[in-house]
Image (cartoon, grey):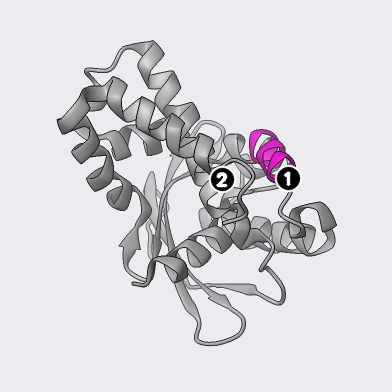
Amino acid sequence: MNRRIFSYVVGVSLASALLAAGPAVRAADEAPDALIKRTSTEVLDAIKSDKAIQGGDVGKIIALVDGKVMPHVNFTRMTASAVGRNWRQATPEQQKRLQDEFKTLLVRTYSGALIQVKDQTVSVKPLRAAAADTEVQVRTEVIGRGDPIQLDYRMEKTASGWKIYDLNVLGIWLVETYRTQFAQEISAKGVDGLIAALAERNKSNTGKKS
């Protein structure tokens, strides 16, 4: 897939699902597909009405992520999966820095896509899961201009509700994409080398909109 298209699609994905709004208590009792549908609609509407986000205000986007994303995403699992087997060898301090830098990377890399949210809507497909399942895949399509965009979510059931830990855009899983990049960096320079590389990349992305 073209890198620019992938960046755009993932950006819209983050906007429509990871920037999940709404009280955590309300989400705790929701089915995973209902949670994705509600939050996607709420957040798309919020972005369309927020001129600061439309203007590419990265600071406001980061604040939105801090306030709204974390309650609905198992970001520790997402980061650990992206880092792979080396996660267990990392110290608690290294793990914290990896999570912080990875979150910043995702937000800064794809923040430019948020200003492109215009008339998109999300169609959630029927959930294929048993009532007792604790991990499910919610399949959706982002509908707007052009062909519908396949967008699937891996979610897990926790005591505080369903959490997203990976997403699939047009057949490409986000975590797997970064796992390949991270493995190469760790192989060459170790965990600290990956942290340094992420920090440098985030620094270079400061102020950019895409």
Q: Quadrant of the C terminus?
A: bottom right
Q: What residue type is labelled 2?
A: Arg
Q: Position of residue 26 (x, y in %)?
A: 70, 42
Do we see residue 155 in this rendering? yes
Residue at position x 67%, y 59% in the image: 38
Residue 30 horizontal side relative to residue 48, left or right? left
Q: Is 193 rendered above or below residue 91?
A: below
Q: Which stretch appears magenta?
A: 58-68
Q: Is 72 rendered above or below residue 130?
A: above
Do we see residue 74 in this rendering? no
Residue at position x 21%, y 38% in the image: 183
Q: Where is residue 159 in the image (x, y as percent from the top left)?
A: 51, 31
Label 2: few (<14), some (14–19) or many (≥20) C-alpha neighbours in 10 Å: many
**Mark 2, residue position:** 108
Residue 75 horizontal side relative to residue 188, left or right? right
Tell which of 41 and 10 is nearer to you: 10
* The stretch drawn in magenta includes residue 61: yes
Q: What residue type is labelled 1?
A: Gly
Q: What element carries label 1?
A: loop
**Mark 1, residue position:** 22
Q: Is mark 2 on a helix, strand or loop?
A: helix
Tell which of 9 and 205 is nearer to you: 205
